[in-house]
Amino acid sequence: MPWRGGTVACAWADGAMCYTFGMDFDFVLRGATVFDGTGAKPFRADVGIVGERIAAVGDLSAVQGRAERKAEGLWLTPGFIDAHTHSDAFLLLEPYAPSKLLQGVTTEIGGQCGGSAAPRLNGARLPSDWESQTYPARPGREAHGPNWDTVADYRACLEAIRPATNVVLFAGHNTLRKGVMGDAPRAATADEVAEMVRRLEQALDEGVWGLSSGLVYLPGVHSRPEEVLALARACARKGGMYATHMRSEGDRLLESIDEVLALTRATGIHTQISHLKTSGRANWPKLPAALERIEGARAEGLWVHSDRYPYLSAGTDLDIVLPDWASAEGNSAILRNLDDPVTRQRIVAELDASGRDPESVMIGGTWAPETRECPGQTLAALMRQWACGFGEAVVRILRADRSRTGAFFFGMCEENLLGILARPWIMPGSDASLRAPWGPLGRDWPHPRAYGTHPRFFRLLTERLGVPPEEAIRRMTGLPAQAFGLPHRGTVCEGNYADLVLIDPEAWRDCADYAHPHRFAQGVDTVFVNGSPVLMGGQINPSAPRRGRFLERASSAAR
């Protein structure tokens, strides 16, 4: 039935606000093919926006919008939710998040893999790519390096720059641990665990969504399961979630899944297993058993989901290949070991004996003039160029970059990737920070997933797995909104926030690759975030207000 206009009062389901309007909507999107995020069949409709909300879905031919967009031939979907990102600090540098907006991403789930921008306690160092940047000045704080401490401080910084996208933040276990006990390579004492719990509870009170862990990274690799369990119990008591990069995604994959599921059973917490994968050829046959464990837990009623990026290489720091003893006490110890001639030769010898395939390691972002030629090249290619062995090549790069080198590790198979993506509880998570081809973030050499995860995820599901488009869209919108409990997002529904995307389905594809990582995805025409058209005609719209916000968790907002 056509919308007849008149004066209509819209009281949203959460009672947060009420609009009264007459004939005009702020925006009307006309004649789009609507994929509503529920998995239902698409339908043709107009969508009217008032303020930050979707005010009407249907035939709006009888009314006008203050601004309108003819959308025949375009798909209208909810804004995509990137379920696993690392954009926490970079949003303060590039608040338009262009690499994400041009994929259609309107909400990022940050603070992942145990590393979050906040709470930054006792001057604890953050990852080197965050530490090395210059951030906007704050009253009483200098404008170099991270200049916030608590989650409340970080939120104040974020609100001051007004990001274009929404942010959900988890508190990182590794970040908490560094703030309490530094990089100490040992189990935490009872008092240290209690202090981490206290700091986590403060972060939860200040708005973080839950706890994340990165148990393969320093210093979390030194934690015992009971330390993580204590933090998860505290998190669950306050209604928070748990997201985990498990202790192993390779040789001890099944044991790591068992640890996660035991924690979930013990606490009842909602759990997200980060970027589910089987790393290393010897571990590829473990996928059926891994999926059986997770799906068995879900059948029991445990709230467990997972995300995955649609690529066959992981991306992290090159120093993860170092022997455990050489990196056990953090970055300062790594640098001491690399600079000492005797210790350096021991590292080289152990790397040469490790059996790691140099063809499977590609260098990503580098920092020093001596390593400027390395990005996009495999270690095997550099070994040939430099006439040296594997260990010497690694040490040469890490010493020059002061252990800040990024790398891509090709250890996964396509069959398993497709087997994981086929599961209806898997959603896209880029595992990437936002990027831009310009400014301070344009000097890096990112994984192509930073620019291409969402269109690539959609194409693999629909073209390789035969998943209907409406189900693929649900996985990118309604599913993550449900899994993370995001209120009034993830579906095209009257009363929901107007996080919306218009897509040209024929043009929608990823363009970035390992040789050309700074290439925007194509095919996204328009993006609304909380009712603001921050992307129009495939271009950033600087005249539109940036209305992205730090999203509150269940204790502060209806869920």
Image: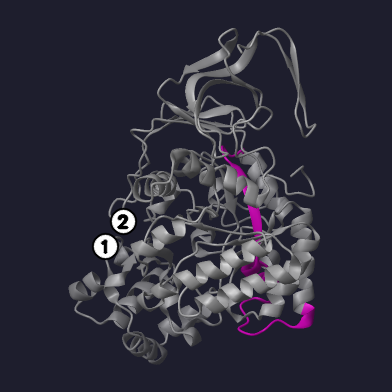
Asked if the stretch drawn in magenta spans residue 55, the answer is no
Disc marking residue 257: none
The residues colored magenta run 162-191
The vertical placement of 292 against 155, above or below, is below
| Quadrant of the drawing holding the N terminus | top right
Q: Is residue 524 left or right of residue 329?
A: left
How crowded pointer 1 is (Cα within 10 Å; few <14, some 14-19, many 20+) is rated as: few
Q: What residue is drawn where x is 58% and y is 13%?
A: 60
Q: Secondary structure at mark 2?
A: loop
Q: Earlier in the sequence, mark 1 or mark 2?
A: 1
Picture mark count: 2
Residue under circle 1?
Answer: 373
Write down the quadrant of residue 219 in the picture. Answer: bottom right
Instruction: Identify the residue at horizontal 46%, vertical 70% (top origin).
Output: 288
Amino acid on which disc 1 is placed: Glu
Q: Secondary structure at mark 1?
A: loop
**Residue 316: which quarter of the image?**
bottom left
Q: Amino acid at mark 2?
A: Tyr
Q: Residues within 10 Å of mark 2 (few under 14, many from 20)?
A: some
Q: Residue at x 77, y 43 (%)?
A: 557
Quadrant of the rendered structure where residue 419 is? bottom left
Q: Can I make out residue 178 in this image?
A: yes
Residue 258 percent location from the top left of the image: 60, 75
Judged left or right of residue 151, residue 72 is: left
State whether residue 324 is above or below residue 145.
below
Position of the C terminus, as image quadrant, is top right
Inter-mark Cα distance, 1 to 2: 14 Å
Residue 514 got which mark? 2
The answer to whether any part of residue 231 appears in the image is: no
